[in-house]
Image (tube, helix red, strand yellow):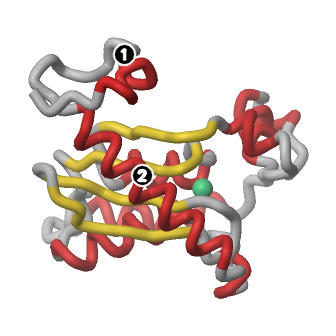
Amino acid sequence: MGIDVGEQSELSDGRLGETERSSDHVRFMRRAIELGRRGSTAGDGGPFGAVIVRSGHIIGEGWNRVIATRDPTTHGEMVAIRDACRRIGSISLHGCELYTSGQPCPMCLGAIYWARIERVFYGFSIQDAAGIGFDDHFIHEQLAKPPGQRAIPEIPLLRAEALEILEAYAANPGRVHY
Ligand SMILES: [Zn+2]
């Protein structure tokens, strides 16, 4: 029970398990949207808020702080991931879900995979954000191209010297696997 019928249509895409309460998903998404609203109203950055949930409880929160921190990596999802990892004392968010007001950009998507987050819910789409000038869509287009055809060149240099530290790390039996 506990189904919020008013929001059912937005969640009826078949990705929710039958035992899940859509009202919880709606509550967490509304929190993400509220954080995005507050942050952007305060001038911290764009209208992007995010929360990370484990076992029905919020364990991390964040909103876009790119302007406030002069740091282009402080997207809402990144801030929320850092908050959650610090709070639980782990580099893994396995078993967690992320709710974000806007579909993650490639940077945040990478962080989401690194953190082992299991599922992502988003409000507006990358195309929606591109409509007001956020260039996430452009980055997705770049990633879809072969490296040699992208706007920012990636140029191999000093591979042999760099490989030395890679091999030394691989040979260390005490290294942390992640
Ligand atoms: Zn992002």
Q: Is mark 2 within 8 Å of ligand 1?
A: no
Disc 2 + disc 1, Cβ < 8 Å = no
Where is ligand 1, by quadrant?
A: bottom right
Residue flagged by tag 1: what amino acid is it?
A: Ser
Q: Relative to 18, is 77 above or below?
A: below
Residue underneath mark 1? 12
Give the left or right position of residue 139, taking residue 165 as reference: right
Residue underneath mark 2? 30
Is 153 or 31 nearer to us in this picture? 31
Give the left or right position of residue 67, taking residue 15 as reference: right
Tell me how many marks there are: 2
Q: Is mark 1 within 8 Å of ligand 1?
A: no
| Earlier sequence position, callout 2 versus callout 1 | 1
SS class of the residue under badge 1? loop
Q: Residues within 10 Å of mark 2 (few under 14, many from 20)?
A: some
Residue flagged by tag 2: what amino acid is it?
A: Arg
Q: Relative to 135, is 63 above or below?
A: below
Q: x and y percent of residue 23 in the render?
A: 25, 38
Q: CA distance from mark 2 to mark 1?
A: 17 Å
SS class of the residue under badge 2? helix
